[in-house]
Amino acid sequence: MAEHTRDTGELARALRAAVGGEVDFSPAARALTTMDASNYRRVPAGVVAPRDADDVAAVLEVCRHHGVPVVPRGAGTSIAGQATGTGVVLDFTRHMNKILDVTPEERTARVQPGVVQARLQDAARPHGLLFGPDPSTHSRCTLGGMIGNNACGSHSVAWGTTADNVHALSVLTYAGTRHRLARGCPPDSGPAGLTDLVDRNLALLRTGYPEGLPRRISGYALDALLPEKGADLARAFCGSEGTLAVLTEATVRLVAAPAARALAVIGHPDESAAAEAAAGLLPYAPLTVEGMAEDLVPAGHGLPRGGAWLFVETGGDSPAQARDRAERILRAADALDGTVVDDPAAVRALWRLREDASGTATRRADGGEAWPGWEDCAVPPARLGAYLRDFRALLAQHGLRGTPYGHFGDGCVHVRIDFDLLSKDGVRRFRAFSEQVAALVVAHGGSLSGEHGDGQARAELLPKMYGDELVGLFGRFKDLWDPAGGMNPGMLVRPDPLDANLRFAVLPARPVDVAFGYPQDGGDFAGAVRRCVGVAKCRTEDAAAGGGVMCPSYRVTGEEQHSTRGRARLLHEMLAGEIVTDGWRSTEVRDALDLCLSCKGCRSDCPVGVDMATYKAEFLHHHYAGRRRPAAHYAMGRLPRWLRAAAPLAPLVNAAARVRPLAALAKRLAGVAPERDLPRLAPETFRRWLRDHMGDRAEVLEQGRTAVLWPDTFTDHLSPSAGRAAVRVMEAAGIGIVLPPGRVCCGLTYVSTGQLDLARKVMRHTLDVVEPLLDLDVPVVVLEPSCAATLRTDLPELLGDDPRTARLAGSVRTFAQALQECAPDWEPPVIGRPVAGQTHCHQHAVLGDAAERRLRERAGLHGALSGGCCGLAGNFGFEKGHYEVSVACAEEQLLPAVRAAAAGTELLADGFSCRTQLEQLAGRRARHLAEVLAEGLDERPGRGRDERPDRGPVTK
């Protein structure tokens, strides 16, 4: 189209006057939408979140007047670049995200384009129905995006692609005309001239498309307009990647959900053997036939013997029938080993391995980076094994590595390849390989895209697959719909080159000066930011779908800038310097990171291990260098210093905190939210109590039965009862206790507020104090999970040049881990109560809770603790301006679980933040696991009872 207006201010004003939804041309909004999950980056003029179809029409009218293109966008998880654009991005996830109705008797649902696929499944489930296509991104991808890409998912062998499940579509063209598209409607239901285009090219449409391909996603599906195929305009529109018109509403078909399912996991020597076996299983009518190799599976996976596996799901009217079908497939498979799984939790865990593959494949075991670019070709299923062998040979010829996985039953392969997209030579190799592998796919009778569409990654190569004549027909089809060229230009038709607009080109060529070591990224902060490939697992609407914790602030606000991906995108643009121009001083990045709870959930839940807590600390370190910080940084960021100073005056400080005017003044000066109560200081610190308790006696340092007990700041000054209880239990288990000879601190509060110079000073002092103890080679027991996580991760990443950091980090154990390691034969008291409460987010992300779960089980503490994040998260929930978000995070899982707990339920929370949040928001006292076990020791037969802490409501 013609060069669009340079006056984006005039464009923004016109849109605000015409549109009821949000219009955002700010640097932050533009930065958040420069990329999708592909290798590409295009800078938009602005973003509009329309409220309805009339808003969409108004946007199109304004953009048409100004000569500005339009790019429809859902969750932004496209892997070929089609969700990026240079004009106005239409964000359908904010308002046009409703399920308008579900009609069970007709097995249809009417939805807006921004509906997340998982939400549609939730709406259909009560009727015994589901929407068949289910990409691995189903927890965040939208129906509009699925229609735009003709998405498929793992169940397409049973239920087909999105195009197979679309009944009717309502669309608006760039010119402003409205169309209702459906099967059987005459072509003239679309733009004028369509009937003539089809009639003049019947022979080409009948012979120009490859046959036998269940996953032919590349190009326009013009053959769907043939009269013998029902002249299906809706089907022809699917997969058009936003290049024809804007979807405003869809009616989709639903299918009957199997009453029960089972999963056959079948081991093969390698992925070629698995691929060759896959086609032979299709006559057994499976729901899925998925394949993946051991490169993508974590150690300790527990899968059957093999170097690659097929996941074959079956359905039935009963669990027995589903299992019988799976066992029949297993018997028919030519396999090394196999098993059938029908426990729902175990099945979900196995599927999570497969669904995370698109992310985990991006980082290789040796730290190398791998990228999309040849992500999802498809060949006839019977050809898949032969294709994979040729594909492996081509990789080797180019010195490249990649691990294929995907929908083997449909002949569709996903792969991330370690392209060098940072150097000119690497980009040249990327192009050469892409051209040669395209020829290879065509030689095997395949499609360049089998799921994610062509976008910019493959559209340039479509003549290799279809020939120039049919590709020319694609252009004429596009021009009938969009003669002005305003719909997503550069995609599918007259595409940008596959090696243009690469998102890495704008990043600094040399590493920037940073405080953390980033050992997994070669010390390069840009490399760390590059970890985010945009699969958007952080954009899930519930913690369970996100993996357990990630990303609590997004689930509260629903805004991209408060997702892990959004923050990574802003950091990317900060380094690029084109849109976000103030570098480390950027207010856009600061504002996005403000609601990051530093929960570390993304460190474990993100498939590629993005660690936004570390990036936030790094940013704050630079952002406030040489400048005045927020009051909370001085107050809560330096909390250990203030608590040590206040300890001798604890009774006086506590009394003053109960005087409302004094407390209000203190909170205002300290940057504390006025809604918060100030925690009470312990009259006697844990460290002082422990010294008195141990007296002059010297512990017998028995190897394997001795541990250092770390007096962290929270246990020492705010919750010494947890420390005293831990001592009781450890002594009962026969574990000798050693106390550090001087003051120690992990540096957590300094790190979380980005005071990294002070953090390193504190950490070095701590290393000096504990150095003599490191030679004992015994566990270091840290009762506070956040402090343990800091010692495990932040300490070695900030002071990686000090060999003592690795020794200390490697010695850190949680309370339960220490009992398991030092006293494996000790039998805990049997409490015999149900539990509720919270697994600390840092424990989930860094330390793991397997030892805690085993210890609770042995102690008769049954039931699961909540996932997610309590919302207090150290200083976050105390900071002024964060209270509402903090409460909303707690209301997601923790508070409902506690309210629903039966009488007599034990409330557990090893983290001081989690206990404080429960006390302040629910008026309930939770306890550290050590406190519950210590009380149980008193209740054993023949033992006295010193004290039973109140488990009921807290009196304020």
Image (spheres, grey):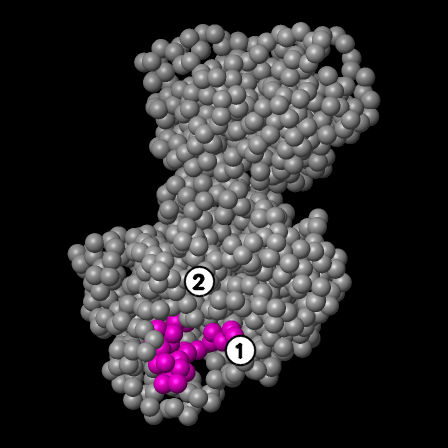
Q: Residue sitting at 58 percent across and 24 percent down? A: 833
Q: In front here: 289 or 526? A: 289
The question of residue 26 being in magenta is answered with no
Above-or-below relation of 201 to 51:
below
Which of marks 1 and 2 precedes in the sequence? 1
Is 279 on the left or on the right of 128, as rendered?
right
Q: Residue sitting at 56 percent across and 58 percent down? A: 316
Q: In front here: 519 or 142? A: 142
In terms of image quadrants, where is residue 527? bottom right
Is 808 on the left or on the right of 453, as rendered?
right
Is 656 on the left or on the right of 293, as rendered?
left
Above-or-below relation of 719 to 524:
above
Where is residue 116? Give x, y as percent.
40, 55
The question of residue 225 being in magenta is answered with yes
Where is residue 67? Give x, y as percent.
24, 70
Mark 1 crowdedness (10 Å alpha carbons): few <14, some 14-19, many ≥20 = some
Where is residue 24? Give x, y as percent.
28, 53
Q: From the image, which quarter does the C terminus lie in?
A: top left
Q: From the image, which quarter does the N terminus lie in?
A: bottom left
Q: In front here: 726 or 138? A: 138
Reading the image, the residue beneath label 1 is 213
Reading the image, the residue beneath label 2 is 255
- Range covered by the magenta-colored residues: 213-240
Q: Amino acid at mark 1?
A: Leu
